[in-house]
Image (cartoon, rainbow, N blue to C red):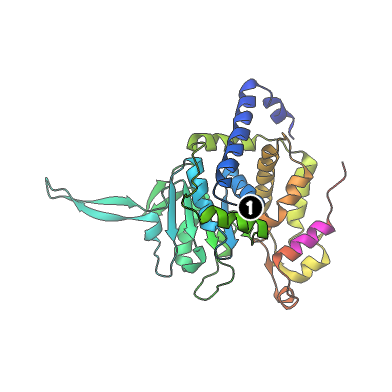
Amino acid sequence: MSTTVTQQLEPEALRGRIARFRQVQSDIVTQVRRVIVGQEEVLEQVMIGLFVGGHCLITGLPGTAKTLLVRTLGQTLGLVFRRIQFTPDLMPSDITGTDIIEEDPTNGRRTWTFVPGPIFGNILLADEINRTPPKTQSALLEAMQERSCTVRGNIYQLPSPFFVLATQNPIELEGTYPLPEAQLDRFLFNVVLDYLDADEEVKVVDLTTVTTIPQADTVTNDKEIMDFQQLVRMVPIGESVARHAVDMVRASRSSDADAPDFVKKYVNYGASVRAAQFLVLAAKARALMRGRYHVTYEDIRSLYIPILRHRILLNFHAESDRLKQDDILKRLLEWKAAPRD
C-alpha cells in the first residue's frame, strides 16, 4: 500500500519540506507558549487540525482560554482571522454575507453587489456556536465541507486554507441549541479543555497580572500551511494499521455484527466512514509531528477518543447508567488491543 509513497520521500526537496515542517511546528509551539499555559494535548490536536485541513470543536468551561488559544494561533500562522459571536438573533447572512443594491452615481443604474461576510477569512472563530438556532448554524455546513458559500444562487469560493474553530460551553444549557449531527460530523476533533493544575494556574496569574501583555509573532503563511497539508497526506500508512483504524470505527456501531455487547446495549448510532478518514489523516499528521515517516497503532489509538466522541449517539440505557461517550470509547480501546507486529 505504501511502497511508492516511501520512495517519493527520498529526494532532497522533500527532505527540505519535512525539515521546514518541523521547524514551523516548533516555532508555533514556542510562540503559543508565550501566551497560553499548559493544555499540551489540546494544542497538539488543534495543530493536527491545521496541518490536516480539518475543523475543530473546542468544548470547555468559561475562562479556560478557548478564544485566546484560537486568536493566538491566528497571529502565529499569519492567516486572516475572523471572529463571529454567535447569538440567538444571528442570521445566516450575518455569516456568509449578502447582496445589496448599489446605484452608480454617473448613470443612475442600480446593480447587485455582493458584500462578503466574516466567513471570508482563513481562520474563523465561531464563538459559542451553540447559542444560535440550527438555521444559522447550518450556514457553516457548505463552507466546512466545500470551502464555498452560496448566496442568492451564486457560489463564492472561500480563501485557502480555511479552518472553522468553534467553541461551546458544556455547562450552561439554557438558551442553547445542540449542533445538528450532520454538522458535528464535519468537525475533525471535539477538543475538551479542562482546568489547569495548581502550578500552571500560578503561571497564568503571573503572566496576565503585569503591565506587559504577551504577544505571539508570525512564523509562517498560508502557502506554507497548504504545502504542509499536502506533505501530511504523503506520509505512508501500513495496511494493518489502516485496517485497525477502520475496525475501531466499525466497533462503535451497534449495527455491526462484530461490535461488543456493551456497544449494542448503549449506542444508538456509531461513527461514520468520515471518522475513519479523519482518524487516518490525523494519525499521519501526528506521526510527522513526532519525527516519524510512518503511522503507528499508537497514533491511531491516541486520537481515537477526540475524533469519535462527538460522532456516537448513546441511548437511554447509557443515560440511566450515567455513561458518556468517552466512557464507551475507553472501553472500546480496552476491548480491542492493538495487533502485535
The image shows residue 195, relative to residue 284, as above or below, that is: below
The residue lying furthest to the right in this view is 340
Q: Who's the residue at 73% across and 50% down the image?
A: 302
**Side of 191 where 132 appears, left or right:** left
Assess disc 1: are there few (<14), some (14-19) or many (≥20) residues with their C-alpha within 10 Å of its C-alpha. Answer: some
**Side of 216 where 245 appears, left or right:** right
Q: Quadrant of residue 25?
A: top right
In the rendered image, residue 86, in percent from the top left (x then y), is placed at: 45, 64
Q: Who's the residue at 57% across and 54% down the image?
A: 56
Between 116 and 193, the one lying in front of the other is 193
Between 231 and 290, the one lying in front of the other is 290
Using the rendered image of the protein, determine whether residue 148 is visible from the camera's viewpoint: yes
Q: Who's the residue at 68% across and 41% down the image?
A: 284
Q: Who's the residue at 51% across and 42% down the image?
A: 76
**Side of 238 where 19 appears, left or right:** left
Q: Main secondary structure of the magenta part?
A: helix
Q: Quadrant of residue 292?
A: top right
Check residue 332 for magenta coloring.
yes
In the rendered image, residue 323, in percent from the top left (x then y), is placed at: 73, 71
In the rendered image, residue 17, in percent from the top left (x then y), is placed at: 60, 28
The magenta segment is 328-335
Residue at label 1?
38
Using the rendered image of the protein, determine whether residue 162 is visible from the camera's viewpoint: no
In the rendered image, residue 55, in percent from the top left (x then y), is placed at: 56, 51
Between 263 and 190, the one lying in front of the other is 190
Check residue 32 for magenta coloring.
no
